[in-house]
Image (cartoon, rainbow, N blue to C red):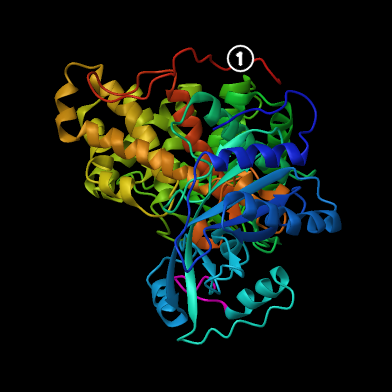
Amino acid sequence: MRKPLSKAGPVPLAQKLSAVRAALRARPVALQAPYPAVTLFFSVCDGFSRARVVNASGPSLESAWQSGLSALRPLLKEAGLQGRWVRVDRVEGVKETNWKQLRAILAATKRNYFRHGLALDAGLANAFLEEELNANAMLYGGNAVEHAVLNERNFSLYARARYPGLDAPGFRDEAPVFVLSTRGVFCDEAGRLHELNGPGPNAGRRHVERLDEAGLLSMIEDASAYLARQVKADGSFVYGWHPCFDRPIGTYNTLRHASTTYAMVEAFEVTRDARLGAAIERSLAHLTGALIHTRALPGGGEAAFLVDTGDEIKLGGNAVAILALAKHAQVTGARAHLPLMEKLALGIAHMQDKASGAFVHVLKAGDLSVKQGFRTIYYEGEAAFALMRLYALTKDSRWLAMVERAFEHFIAQEHWKHHDHWLGYCVDELTRHRPEERYFRFAIRNVADHLDFVANRITTFPTLLELMMAARRTLARIDSMPQMRPLLAQVDLVRFEAALQKRAHHLLNGHFWPELAMFFRKPDRIAGSFFIRHHAFRVRIDDVEHYLSGFVAYWNDLSETAMPRNEVAIRRPAGAQGIKTSCGS
């Protein structure tokens, strides 16, 4: 459902509401007594502050609609709202419970994953959408509590704001409360209608039948534009936001600065957006001028290191700095940073044991002494992947030799059991230059027994899509090599593709569509970004980065037949056109 109502100029609110009402008429639903036959929630937002929400009930859609408009008009006038975004939800199901039982339900539900509305009375007069509950942290007990929990303070504050004069809910165990299932229609600023999903993991956001090129490009543009807006004049990032109450995240991480810039360059290769390009240049200038430092090595010579907070040098930091600089060089043709990339690679070499191929993970920046031998498996895959990208750029055999030594260690330690997306990226690059069976086997093992997890993980877990897209490219190459093709028997290719598709669609539930962003304190700040639901909808630059990299890879694959012959494949939609890479540059 995406009907354009106007081709030019702002679409009047009355016209948007009329179109939404027509869409709701096409889907009649009436509840049975003792509940009102029809209950509607009207939500209106201009993007600057939370949506204003009113609800109304009646014996028919028309009566509930007119009651809702009567309540909505003075509220819009008072707030001066023009109705940029308009959403109307209809209650399609009600289940009575009490606060004691609801607390038990919440205790068995992952935090922020309660996907229903609530009403305080059988007449549904005092009721809340799921989005209101979550955007106001009404069912959130803090990051130390893994499950959903009734936050009585936040609940009472928002309830009184929504319903002036309402007595504070008592939350007594035996007092009734009503769980609501809703479904709605959203009208965007251009007057396009979007059908919203009903209960389930996709609840409350627009229905997307398939991931096509245009829809993916729109998300890539929106998310990369969000990241570009976070790059300040000095090239550092606004690190992130807690969007429920528009609170900035006060920490910083230079590794994530570099890795986010890498994802931005990936997106720039697709969009060629000038503002994104300018933000990338500011970020890279800050990275190379303020965050990377040269140190004398104990055995002579110099190397460069990305220095992070706590005066730390992280193996992964050097790696993602190389990735950002190498991708920038590949996309733009610029070669000014090649000497710095070499010094960063020498820094990685300093952290590798030449006999075993293993890496030290964290050094003290002051004297390059070891601070922590192991911190996270991700650093090793990042390091090897970065060296492969540098090798592809320079053909310097030192970097390929380091990766091959590292893979002796990875294979001996069975690192495929970690299902690391960075190792997936790396082995895909490595097999382009060293198409050896042992490396292909590693790539297959990295995903073959992980497909159920990829398909069914409740959280969006965006790096899973990155893992699958990297593996997909490797599998396609295996299929093109007759001597390697028997290896494909080690992975169920149909299940692989089904898991990949399910994961890609599930990532849509981590996108701040305007119909969701409108319920948070500053919608315009977060709209178009990506979030982590179980971290109170946190939007951090590296969160956005991983969604963006996964969807860029998916978008790129639309132009290719990426799966082995006779298996399910993502294919370019009929008639779809490629992106003209000259636009916006």
The C terminus appears in which quarter of the rendering? top right
Can the viewer see residue 301?
Answer: no
Residue 557 vs residue 93, the one in the foreground: 93
Residue 186 vs residue 311, the one in the foreground: 186
Q: Main secondary structure of the magenta part?
A: loop
Q: Is residue 32 left or right of residue 158?
A: left
Q: Is residue 76 above or below residue 171?
A: above
In this picture, which residue range is highlighted in magenta?
A: 142-151
| Residue under label 1 | 580
Q: Is residue 340 left or right of residue 563?
A: right
Q: Quadrant of residue 233?
A: top right
Under mark 1, the amino acid is Lys
Which percent across, then down, holds residue 526? 66, 49
The N terminus appears in which quarter of the rendering? top right
Q: Is residue 1 above or below residue 58?
A: above
Residue in view at x 32 percent, y 50 percent: 456
Q: Secondary structure at mark 1?
A: loop
Residue 550 vs residue 98, the one in the foreground: 98
Is residue 7 magenta-colored? no
Q: Is residue 175 left or right of residue 450?
A: right
Report the number of numbered marks.
1
Residue in view at x 60 percent, y 53 percent: 539
